[in-house]
Each structure stands twice: as C-alpha cells, then as structure tokens.
Image: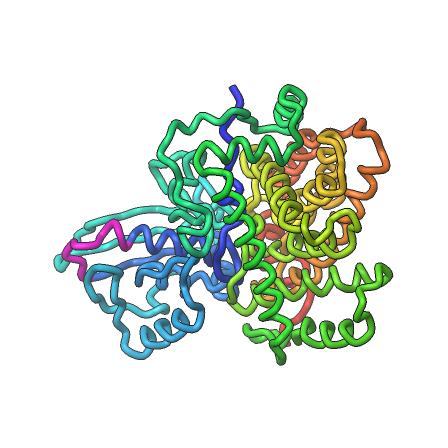
Amino acid sequence: MADVPVSVFDLFSVGVGPSSSHTVGPMRAGAEFASLVAGLPVRSIAVDLYGSLASTGQGHGTLGAVVAGLMGSHPESVDPDQMSAALDALERDGLLRLDAGATVPFRLTDIVLHPLTMLPRHPNAMRLRARDEAGADLADETYYSIGGGFITRDGIADADAGADVADADVAAADVAGAAIPVDDTVPFPFSSGAELLAACAASGLPISGVALANESVTRDERAIRSGLLCIHQVMESCVDRSVRRAGCLPGGLDVRRRAATWHEQLTREDPDHDPLFAMEWVNLVAMAVNEENATGGRVVTAPTNGAAGIIPAVLYYALTYVPAITPTERDDAVVRFLLTAGAIGSIYKERASISGAEVGCQGEVGSAASMAAAGLAEVLGGTPEQVENAAEIAMEHNLGLTCDPIGGLVQIPCIERNAIAANKAINAARMALRGDGVHHVSLDQVVETMRQTGADMSTKYKETAMGGLAVNVPLC
C-alpha cells in the first residue's frame, strides 16, 4: 500500500537560520516541551544534547534555539532580534521564563553536551527534563530532529513526525489556509518515483497536478495557491535583505558577505538580464539566501536550511530566463514548480533522509538539487518521465556528498555549495528535456543508493565537524 506523501507545506516551512535540523527542530522541541509542562510546579530544567546536535550545536545555534523554544518562540514567527535580546537577558539574569509556566534558574552553560554519544534512533537527539522542588522528574522527553525542521520523540513513530511540527505551514497560520478536518485519504498516495509516475499515467495529470490533488484533501485550491505564493515571497524577501547587508558573517570565521557586492556589480554590468549572465545571477541568489541563513535570518526551509538557497535560485532562473513564462503566467509557474519539487522531496523524506547528520550533505544539497531540477523541468514543459529523469540526474551527481562544515558553522563550504548545486539542477533539467524520459537509472534506484551511501558514510562526515574540511582547514 502506498503511503500518504509529506505535504509541500511541511517541506517548505518558514523558519530561522542557520540550520533546520540544528536550529528549527530544537526550537520546536523546546516549545513543545514547554507546552507539556505548562502549569506544573517546575523548579528546574535539564537539557542534554547528543551526537551531531552536541558536536556542532555551538556553530549551528542549537543551544539558543532550544532555550528560545522553552521560552515560547516558534521558528515560523520568532523575530531573530527579539530572540537574541531574550537570550542576552537569560545570560545576564540567569533566569529562564518558561512559556506559560514557571521561572527557573538557567543559563546556556547549563546545557550538557554529549558529542560522542549517538542515540540509536537518530544522530540529532536532545533530552529535556523538568523537575520539582525535590528534584523529582515531572516530565522527561527525548526528542529527535530528523531533518528539515521535522521532529519526533520517543513513543512517536517517524512516520507521524509531521504531527510534531507546530503547524509549520508558513509564517502566518492564515496564509495557507487552515487545514480542513476531513478524511486524510489522498486520491494519489505514493512514496516512490514509480508510484508517482503511475499516478500521473492513470490520471493524465502532470506531477504538479497529482501533488495539487493530494494537497486539496486538507486545503482548498485557493489556499494552496496563496500559501505557495507566500512561501515564494518569503524566499524573495530573504534575498532582498541579504543583498543589503555588508561586513562579515557571525561565528568567528570572518567570512565576508559577498551577496551585496555581487548584486551591485551585476546590476551595473547586466541591467537587462542578458542570458549570458544567467549563471551569475543564479549564483547570487543561492549565496544571498545562504548568507542570510548563516546570519540567523528568516529563510524558507527547502527542504533544509543548509540547502535553502538552491530552490529559490533555480526558481529565479525559471521566472527570469524562460521566455514561455510571461508575467501573467508567473504565479502559475511558481505554484507548479513548488508542487513538483515538493512531490519529489516527499520521496526523499520517506524513503531515505534529508538530514545531513544522518546521510551527509547528499541528503540536504542533493535532495534540494533533485527537487529543483524536477520543478524546473515541469515548468519547462517536461513530461512526468522527463521530470523524474531530471530529479534522478541531479541526485546521481551529488551522491556521496559529505557534510563537513568548518567550525561547525553553516558557511564553508555550505554557501558556495548551494550555488554550485543550483547550476547542477538547471543542467540536470536541461539534459532530461533533451531526452524522451527513458533512462537507465530510475529515481527510486538513486534514492536508495543515497540512503545506502549515507549509512556507509563515516560519522565524521555527517555534520560533526570532525572530518574533511572541518579538520584540514585551520581556524586561525
């Protein structure tokens, strides 16, 4: 029996940087735990981080994120500046005000890190405990941040993890429309590329049409459309903010921001968007998004924060350089692109992983490139078979990609890697459209290969900052 696909609004959610699994997920876990203990006589809080959350948590903002969640912040709506001010006050006063609950003594230094301890279920694990005056546990929960901002916890199956995401559709709950409380049986259940193609063949619909029909079970079409256009607007706003920032990125590596300078240069050199400059603009958009992500700004998780620049960059390419997409067809193209990308992303989420801590960067940047290639192939007029081929090509040439961020920061090689992958996605779509959809390697085969490669990959190459560039490039 085929599975119900992950919603496009779960794969594309609004949050803050620098990491969906290390910032967005822990914030959601903290907020859920605070809700759980609201009204209880809590006198102390204990937070333990394990595995990748502990080894790169400082650089990824995990410690502040989980505490911000405990204070009532949610990634969809939190103001990064207000969050920073609240954390400064916490360090100054040593008091943690739980959301709708007690005030307890706490500082970020009280968080216990276990970088070498991997819990069996997932490398991104955190344990949250609330205790009474006598030191007895009032609540003890172990959460797992399983990639893309999704969380689950002991006692909850991974397949139900989406229910633990705090209605992360978009920044405001009314943008995508409230979910309609109806039977969640979708007309075209699928969890593989083969099942998706079969649904297209049986219905005569493109991949975006199949995805739209499934989303329509819980939202009306108008709400789906407005929600996806809102997500695109957040992507564009992210770029606009980034190209106005100067100086260096936070974190201590002193990585210079390049988006503002590049934007100024390209605006001067290419005011009319000559197609010869297309790659330059794609690079700019991808890097602008990921510089904003590295700053801790507001981004769209697509499907992760570490890979957040790829889909906006490829969508920018489609809207700017595809002659068939006229101004009146622009919104339709955005909706079809994101629905198609979401359908492909749901396959990676269900059959493999989008977590860098679980399968390396092939699960983040590779999945995003595959999703973007599919979206572009669809709006370029590709058949479902050509779209599936585009998704396969993009992942095939990201297999084995490691996650080895220098200093545990989502900066090097992450920012440039998004730009490179965006161009790979464009090339994959172009290659697929030159064919007829018949190819030797299927999407399902490459997804399974990615999963197996991730399982075989050494832990030091999976978001721990213990291998690769992270150890071969000195920090000073």
Q: Position of residue 422 (x, y in %)?
A: 72, 53
Please check the rendered image and state whether residue 37 is part of the magenta-colored stretch, yes or no. yes
The residue sitting at 80% across, 67% down in the picture is 272
Q: Residue at x 35, y 34 (%)?
A: 181
Vertical side of 120 occupied by 85: above or below: below
Q: Residue at x 70, y 52 (%)?
A: 314
State the extent of the magenta-drawn residues as a range: 34-43
In the current view of this chain or complex, which residue is farthest to the front? Answer: 328
In the image, taking residue 58 as reference, residue 108 lies left or right, namely: left
Question: Which is more toward the observer, 194 or 206?
Answer: 206
Regarding residue 302, the answer to whether it shows in the image is yes
Answer whether residue 360 is visible to the viewer in this image: no
Residue for point 55% across, 25% down: 188
Side of 284 relative to 60 (left or right): right
Rendered location of residue 472, percent (x, y):
69, 64
The quadrant holding residue 107 is bottom left
Based on the picture, tell me whether residue 117 belongs to the magenta stretch.
no
On screen, residue 437 above or below 311: above
Q: Position of residue 229 (x, y in %)?
A: 56, 51
388 left or right of 96 in image: right
Quadrant of residue 250 within the rendered picture = bottom right
206 vs 201: above or below: below
Residue 40 coordinates in the image, percent (x, y): 16, 54
Q: If the image is split into quadrants, where does the C terminus sit?
A: bottom right
Near-viewer residue (469 or 437): 437
Dominant secondary structure (helix, strand or loop) of the stretch shown in magenta: loop
Residue 423, compared with residue 346, is above or below; it is below
**What is the quadrant of residue 344 in the picture?**
top right
